Image (cartoon, rainbow, N blue to C red):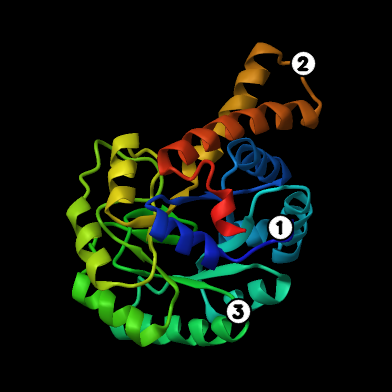
């Protein structure tokens, strides 16, 4: 089926008490693996590319790959720009055919974050494209953006931010971090509930790679509607290739490396979808 926006997906998740899994993809094999997992579980799914991935392959290339695979699928598929770094990149993504965009102004001041997020939201909303923004900082490193510490989202600021910007979903900081965790993360899960009470748009959790299943489930129960997974997919794909080369070092066919990478990513994505509770929810978006 054609690519769909994230609006119906996240509205269904918010009313149904589950979260849509959003998975960062780097190549054709990862795209095929994520959509295959969604097909098997009858789950809505979001595929995401970051600015560095876009720089590697171009917006048009990823849109073409995802759209081609989505056209063969019976479940809703959304293509999302993750951690959009500028108004210009968000506009280019929409022009290229992305069906959801994020603008990340979380490293700016509160007022500057509002200004850039509103600018993108005004432009995207006029095109019928949903916009995710981020308030509060998620630790760790995502592309070229790095945060040394966590700044959890203030509920009152979140309510003001959404009202003034017109964004359609909000990524919040509750103690998560991008990349793999060193030690056990301590999450302020109650903050999800507090923000959910005062914010009308769906909430997003970044930095889920490495969180326990129970942590993710509780965050979803408290109001998270979209959960991002990136680092662990890259690791699963690469580790599968390393294992194949260790066992059969004479392997030279890239298709064999791609096949084992796809299988590993597909199984991981299925697991994460079950944790998010979005299995058998594709019908909510049709």
Of pointers 3 and 2, the one earlier in the residue sequence: 3
Pointer 1 residue: 62
Q: Mark 1, mark 2: which one is toward the viewer?
A: 1
Q: Nearer the viewer, residue 48 or 168?
A: 168
What is the CA distance from the residue labelled 1 to the residue labelled 3? 20 Å
Image quadrant in which the N terminus is located = bottom right
What is the CA distance from the residue labelled 1 to the residue labelled 2? 31 Å
Pointer 3 residue: 128
Residue 144 in view, yes or no:
no
Pointer 2 residue: 250
Q: Residue at x 25, y 36 (%)?
A: 183
Q: Quadrant of residue 37?
A: top right
Q: Nearer the viewer, residue 131 or 175?
A: 131
SS label for mark 3: loop
Residue 60 in view, yes or no:
yes
Q: Residue at x 38, y 50 (%)?
A: 207
Q: Quadrant of residue 123?
A: bottom right
SS label for mark 2: loop
- Residue at the extreme top of the image, as rendered: 247
Q: Up-down: is 221 above or below 198?
A: above
Task: Left or right? Give the position of 218 relative to 69.
Answer: left
Q: Quadrant of residue 142?
A: bottom left
Q: Residue at x 63, y 60 (%)?
A: 79
């Amino acid at each position: 089926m054609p690519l769909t926006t994230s609006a119906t997906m996240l509205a269904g998740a918010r009313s149904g008490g589950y979260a849509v899994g959003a998975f960062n993809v780097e190549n054709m094999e990862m795209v095929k693996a994520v959509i295959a997992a969604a097909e098997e579980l009858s789950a809505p799914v979001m595929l995401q590319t970051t600015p560095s991935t876009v720089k590697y392959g171009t917006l048009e290339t990823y849109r073409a790959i995802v759209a081609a695979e989505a056209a063969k699928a019976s479940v809703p598929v959304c293509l999302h720009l993750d951690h959009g770094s500028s108004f210009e990149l968000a506009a280019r993504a929409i022009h290229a055919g992305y069906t959801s965009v994020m603008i990340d102004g979380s490293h700016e001041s509160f007022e500057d974050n509002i200004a850039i997020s509103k600018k993108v939201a005004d432009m995207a909303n006029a095109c019928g494209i949903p916009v995710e923004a981020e308030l509060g900082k998620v630790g760790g490193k995502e592309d070229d953006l790095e945060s040394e510490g966590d700044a959890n989202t203030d509920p009152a600021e979140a309510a003001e931010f959404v009202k003034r910007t017109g964004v359609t979903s909000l990524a919040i900081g509750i103690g998560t971090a991008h990349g793999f965790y060193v030690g056990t993360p301590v999450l302020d899960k109650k903050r999800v509930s507090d923000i959910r009470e005062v914010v009308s748009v769906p909430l997003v959790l970044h930095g889920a790679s490495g969180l326990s299943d129970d942590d993710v489930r509780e965050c979803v129960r408290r109001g998270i509607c979209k959960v991002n997974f990136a680092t662990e997919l890259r690791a699963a794909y690469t580790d599968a290739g390393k294992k194949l080369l260790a066992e059969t070092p004479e392997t030279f066919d890239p298709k064999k490396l791609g096949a084992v990478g796809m299988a590993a990513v597909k199984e991981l994505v299925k697991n994460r979808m079950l944790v998010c509770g979005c299995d058998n929810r594709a019908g909510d978006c049709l």
